[in-house]
Image (cartoon, helix red, strand yellow):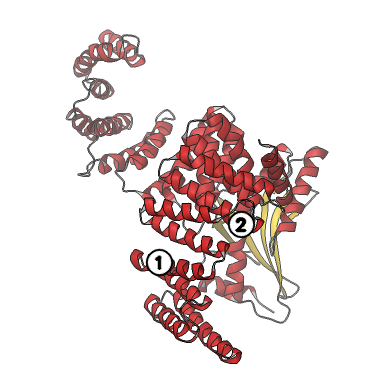
Amino acid sequence: MTTLDEIAALLDAADLNYGRVEGRIRTGFATDIYEDPEGDNCLHLVIGLQEDGELVRILAPMAYRVPAKTGSRRLAAIHRTLNQINWESRVVQYEMDTEDGEIRLAIDFPLEDGKLTELQLTRMLRLMPNVADQCHLGLRRAIEEGVALPTEEALRRELERFVRGET
Amino acid sequence: MGEPDRTSHQAEFQDRLRAGDRHRAAEEMEHARAEYLQALAYAETHLGEDSTEVDRACLALASLHSALDEPAEELAVLERRVRIRRSKGEVAEIVDALQDVAQCLGDQQKTDEALAAYAEAVGLCDESVEAHSAMLRSTLLYLGNLLLRLDRAAEALPHFERGLRICRTETPFPAYGAARLLLHRGEALLALHREDEAIPLLEQATPLLSHRSQRPSTSVGKLLYYLANHYQREGRHTEAERAYANAALQTAAGPKPNFHNLAYIFQAWGANDLKQRRADRAERHLRRGLKAALRAHAPHDADVLSIQQDLVNLFIPAKRYAEAETILTEMVAACQHPDFDDAASRERFHNNLGFVQVHLEEFPKAELNLRRALAEPTKDENCYVIKNLGLMYQKMGYVAEAIREYERALPLFVKHHGADHPVAAFIREALAELRAA
């Protein structure tokens, strides 16, 4: 079991800025291309504990929002892109709330009877903005244009067709 | 030597090499050198001068010499690897070692020798032998890239094309190898001003090479930037934006971000934002470009000043004079550097600073800067500065002085920029207003 005070102490040790609000820890990381809904290059994170401190949950809530009344074709592209990103990802997962269109990044880390270490926490935290950057263009294109992220295999096939088709 | 003896010598060699690797990882370079040299000597004594272990120790030493910028030593150990591999006669192995030698020579600006090493590697390969295909096409890629770096794009092109021909014969299809050949063939075509042929190649190669499974690459970032510029010129601003974002990610996220390139990407991205009438995004991108430029260059460098000028051009029409003043003050300070020898720019920076200070009603500062601008004679006889002096006096309520300066400025505008120039029209209106007062 881990407490929020212990997580705060780990963040202090790692020299990371954070704030505590309503039983959660809030922090943020600069990104290269991901933009928050205000257009800033920042990923806002929330760290919380569940199951009596046996599970750490790190979230980037409201990383994106799918507009209400988005058509089925575009929704299919978004779901397909999220599925593709999750298929290619370790640790970080993208979640979509189909009720309000919120898309967030999430890490669930079961501690059970163990103690969270500084290295585990900072690796998870620093992974979030990296993944947000890597997936930003594909996801934004799916949300704004309804074009699904192609798989690596599809890109390989497309390239092979092009090269073999050249004379 | 009996097999058990050899095995125990190999184990001892491995231990020494690993000890070197540990020091290297901890950046204890001299300790690493000592361990690698011991490993090399041990392998020479117990496993043979031309053994695989000597080859491996040479490679570890080459990497260390490269990190310590010891070019002669690096080249010597890499050449030794070629000799070891020649003694065994395995073509792919020799070509692999020759590639390292050629790259080392290229990095040391010994371009003729580097080209000769690549040519030798290419000559050793037989295109009809399947086992040579991968080595041959990678050698052709490196050779082509060296020629591109030497501004010899026309000579590079056939090597990329030959590499792609080899790809077509391979099973399974080497997608990433082909994508790299395609990308640099596109780069060569761009250098030869054959943009129409280059763009489709870049469009095919970049999605795969920038897939998240691949490490970010500055060279992919550079070509995405060219692609984005092409889209911007064509008015395809959404595609341009996506390509700039991808270029920025490729350039910033690698182990060694290229801040010089990053500055160019953000500046061009800002221009694309403005064409989409998104001034807030343009400002953000220009500010990030400025930050990157300042990490690569001194404040008086033309690249830094160019981005600052773009920011000023954003602020002045938006009447954000205080923010423009901050940037222009930095530009004026930068142009005092002894290496800065562009008098026309120095005049323009002082004049612009004076202009925004007039609008901020900081008149003493404005006058000082406008007078400094006048000290740098320009082809148009400083007519903008004189007009701004008129504007300053007008705002201060000094009618006679304002009329005097405007009357000086007007014929100069007519002479250098034509009677219909918008500033000439502005001066005529101001004069009419002042005379009527």
Percent from the top left, x then y, of residue B11? 55, 86
Location of residue A26 (image quadrant):
bottom right
Q: Relative to B403, is B89 above or below?
A: below
| B236 left or right, relative to A150 | left
Residue farthest to the left, as pictured: B375
Residue farthest to the right, as pictured: A72
Q: Nearer the viewer, residue B294 or A97?
A: B294
| B140 left or right, relative to B333 | right
For the residue marked with disc 2, what is the amino acid? His
Q: Is residue B281 visible?
A: no
Percent from the top left, x then y, of residue B189? 52, 35
In the picture, the disc for residue B132 is 2
Label 2 SS: helix
Identity of the residue drawn at 26% across and 43% down: B333
Chain name for mark 2: B
In the picture, the disc for residue B67 is 1
Percent from the top left, x then y, of residue B273? 53, 34
Chain name for mark 1: B
Of the two numbered discs 1 and 2 on the same chain, state the one appearing first in sequence.
1
Identity of the residue drawn at 29% across and 43% down: B300
Q: Nearer the viewer, residue B164 or B325?
A: B164
Image mark count: 2
Percent from the top left, x then y, of residue B225? 51, 40
Q: Nearer the viewer, residue B169 or B234?
A: B169
Q: CA distance from mark 1 to mark 2?
A: 31 Å
| B123 left or right, relative to B293 | right
Label 1 SS: helix
Q: Quadrant of the N terminus of chain B?
A: bottom right
Location of residue B360 (image quadrant):
top left
Q: Relative to B87, is A45 above or below?
A: above
For the residue marked with disc 1, what is the amino acid? Ala
